[in-house]
Amino acid sequence: MAAHDLQLQVYTDAGRREGLDVRGAYVHDLGATRREPVDVDRTSVASAEQVVTAAAVRIRARDYAPNPGARCRSCEVRTLCASALGLSRPGREQPAAQTEKTFITSSP
């Protein structure tokens, strides 16, 4: 799953639940001047909903087991997580320039 797929699939799910006819979702990379489509078919959106539901169950159960990896570099709790200390040093990383914007589209 690409970096923004889950986010846009969740937005799509929410929009459809509100009655919007969401037909597409795209990540616009402003630095590379390209647009990448994100799958928002029923299967992809249902899979995203399962991922979010599983995460909510873990949060409610206070299951905060670390899952270290490359994701630690962009995790918002890396400064508090002992598992992330070897992967990123708070204060040493420069914030990345924002080069992507996410969009969902729907028909009126």
Image (cartoon, rainbow, N blue to C red):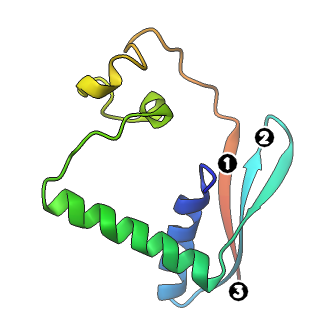
Q: How many marks on residues?
A: 3
Splitting the image into 4 quarters, where does residue 19 fall?
bottom right
The quadrant in which the N terminus is found is bottom right
Q: Which residue is mark 1?
A: 101
Q: CA distance from mark 2 to mark 3?
A: 26 Å
Q: Residue furthest top?
A: 92
Label 1 with label 2: CB-CB less than 8 Å: yes
Q: Nearer the viewer, residue 108 or 11?
A: 11
Q: Which residue is mark 3?
A: 108
Q: Nearer the viewer, residue 101 or 72?
A: 72
Q: Is residue 90 above or below residue 8?
A: above
Q: Residue at x 65, y 55 (%)?
A: 102
Instruction: Say what secondary structure mark 3 lies in.
Output: loop
Q: Residue at x 79, y 34 (%)?
A: 31
Q: Residue at x 60, y 53 (%)?
A: 4
Q: Is residue 97 above or below residue 46?
A: above
Q: Which residue is mark 2?
A: 30
Mark nearer the N terminus (1 vs 2) = 2
Q: CA distance from mark 1 to mark 3?
A: 22 Å
In this view, the mark in front (1 or 3): 1
Mark nearer the N terminus (1 vs 3) = 1
Using residue 50 as the reference point, say whether residue 58 is left or right of it: left
The percent position of residue 100, horizontal first and vertical second, equals 69, 43
